[in-house]
Image: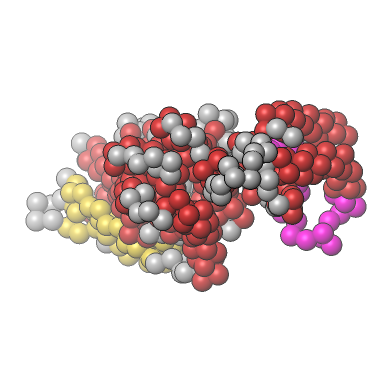
Amino acid sequence: MDRKTYAIIGVVGFALKNHLDRLVATFGFHRPWALFNYWEPIPAVGRITALARSQAVFLETMVALSLPFVWVGVVMTVKRLRSAELPTGLAILFFVPFVNLLFFLVLSLLPEHEPVASSARRADPWLARVIPDSAVGSGTLAIVLTGMVGLCFVFVGVRLLVNYGWGLFVALPFTMGFASAVIYSYRQPRSLPKCVSVAVLSVAILGAGLLAIAVEGAICLIMAIPIAVPLAAFGGMCGYLVQRHRWIERGAPALLCMLLGLNPGVGWLEYMIAPRPQTFLVRSSIDINAAPERVWKQVVAFTEIPPPTEWIFRAGVAYPIRAEILGQGPGAERHCVFSTGAFVEPIEIWDEPHRLKFSVTSNPAPMQEWTPYSRIDPPHLHGFLVSSGGQFSLTPLPSRGTRLEGTTWYRHGLWPAHYWRMWSDTIIHQIHMRVLRHIRDAAEAAGN
């Protein structure tokens, strides 16, 4: 089985199966069916014993439909392994989620074995048979291969482990940059700038892929660029240094396998440890030309704020619209309505007109992602940036004005924590200032 035939049959077979599954799921069971349903056919069901009867029938039908395709896939894979002189036992990878995608790509690239005289048959590493000799060919393979592997790792870390940490933002870009540079320079020595360029492009391809398959939106990808690109470039530099050693031809396969294990290892370790997010504090203040009594009325509940002009809010970050109060004094409930929903804020301290302190019992989504799709719902929009409380302090000024200070206590489940704190602090400060400016304008206008 030559690689071209194998690739064509695989792509056509998957397209045929995907359309057949869609038709059966949509018209036979009135269920949506998308690409990710192959890994999670029925969301929110943890084990088979928890399936309802209708769900069990649906799964049995989908499994029955897949059997002919599985048989064809296994037979073709065994034939392809034989033609590439690889152990047929590797066909088991056909059934391993995510790995089977990479396995299919590798088998579609490996050349078929051509019998030669035993004297001419020289031990040639399998990696050398896969990687093209040209700079363009090896660079393209390095970028596409590491991009696909990175996509699988992101999906596992984000969708299955629900973890946004060191494995995703540090280990992954570094290993992608390192691996792409090693693959790129495997056949021939490459220059440092070229190794770094290939490393950075591999991360760029990953970002484009995440945007294309609706795993992430543009805003979060932009926020990740300042940490991901330098780490990928550093990985590319390390890969460039590795190519200068003579053992690269024999050691590269083992090195790449070690790199493949680094990211899921770090991600799984974080998942098992489950570090507790630290609570952070942001304070912002503004001086208002009005007495504290007049400012207090606007603090407790303020009218609708005009549409935002700040780029950060126009880009999709949630912004405050108005505030409403139900009741008066401690125990009253304040609702601060944002563009994505409302914060529910039970009042803890009502010290009129000096201090209003409240807890937060409900948080809306922190943003609406930029995406080519109508809507996406990545896990980090739920429970990864959470406000736990807030406070307004009013201090009289000698000029008969008021210094209004807004404080927010919050936590986030993103690591490295201090990198992401730079973004979250900036966002919360901008939210503060949007509210404080509106209160200032309303209080000063009320006195005229």
For residue 258, side relative to residue 228 (left or right): right
Compare residues 46 and 394 and report the one nearer the observer. 46
Q: Is residue 328 visible?
A: no
The quadrant of the rendering that contains the C terminus is: top left
Residue 311: image location, x then y, percent: 33, 34
Compare residues 141 and 52 and report the one nearer the observer. 141
For residue 355, side relative to residue 364 (left or right): left
The quadrant of the rendering that contains the N terminus is: top right
Which quadrant holds residue 419? bottom left
Compare residues 396 and 406 and report the one nearer the observer. 406
Q: Residue furthest left?
A: 398
Region rendered in magenta: 33-56
- Determine the residue positioned at 70% across, 32% down: 2
- Determine the residue positioned at 46% across, 69% down: 276
- Its colouring scheme is secondary structure
Residue 410: image location, x then y, percent: 40, 60
Q: Is residue 139 visible?
A: yes
- Determine the residue positioned at 42% across, 47% down: 182
